[in-house]
Image (cartoon, grey):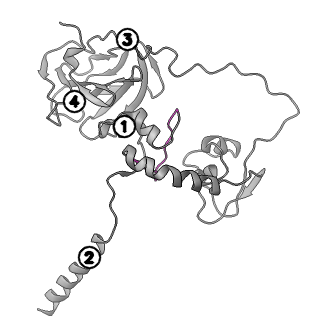
Amino acid sequence: MMIRVLFVSALIIALSACSNQRWDPDDYPVSSGDTIYSIAWKYELDPFELARWNNLSSPYRIYPGQRLKMNPTDAAAASGQARSESQSARVPRPDAITVKKGDTLYALANRYDVNAKQLASINGLKSPYVIVPGQTLKLTAPRSGKKPAAKSPAPSATASLPADNSRISWQWPVQGKLITTFKSNKTDRKGIDIAGTEGKAIKAAAPGKVVYSGNGLISYGNLVIIKHNRSYLSAYAHNRKLVVREGDMIKAGQKIAELGKTGTESPRLHFEIRKNGKPVNPLKYLPSS
């Protein structure tokens, strides 16, 4: 009897402690593998708005442990505080610093207003960018006597994307039997499912840029997401193999994956189109077959 009383008392204390912890559904903790596009896709948000709420500019880099505001109200309330904190946290940039206990590369990069990957490159660090107390980090690249050769400007990430106000010419990503249609009120029917044989080529439904290529979204299996313009994204799920990477510029009809059954019971392509983050019926966009 005494053991039972002690157990119940311990359980009550534990539950009480849990109830005192703050859980905020609008404050999303970034995990490894997350991108702005995958998070927006999961919560049916416009990725560009999500980036704006968190004061992120292209290419929208986020890091594990970072917390994201998931609605504009919270973001607006936090923006004034974030600006004052960032201004006070950033200090004049010396040529080099000594790592202290608790420092991380990303925190130091933010403190001294340096790009984290650039800071890692300057110091010859490779992912996951481990640093240790007492280590000296250079904050600026060493100057050489030679004037660096001029580099050709990098092509714009959206250079070959259709203009935002132009009409997208959609095409079927694969030919096969339509086995599931769109239902906006069903969580598992945000697109259409097309049956097919494993290994069959999955093709881009329109030109664009690959903004996600991986398997980090539950129930989608191996997934590719393509950005077509400011408004439209398309997704291709359950693939056996992905043949494109994030950042690749894709032509309409280009092979991006091989049909499979990852995340489902039978070989199929799950295809979605989203407008400003919201699922729309692909059959209203695809040509009549």
Secondary element type, mark 3: loop
Q: Residue furthest right?
A: 145
In the image, residue 221 above or below residue 259? below
Q: CA distance from mark 2 to mark 4?
A: 44 Å
Can you identify the residue that label 2 sits on?
16
Q: Nearer the viewer, mark 4 or mark 1?
A: 1
Could you say which disc has been placed on residue 38 in the image?
1
Q: Amino acid at mark 1?
A: Ser
Q: Nearer the viewer, mark 4 or mark 3?
A: 3
Q: Is residue 30 visible?
A: no
User: Foreground: 155 or 204?
Assistant: 155
User: Foreground: 82 or 210?
Assistant: 82
Q: Which residues are magenta?
A: 58-69
Image coordinates of residue 241 in percent, x first then y, are 33, 27
Q: Amino acid at mark 3?
A: Ala
Can you identify the residue that label 3 sits on?
252
Q: CA distance from mark 1 to mark 3?
A: 22 Å
Secondary element type, mark 2: helix
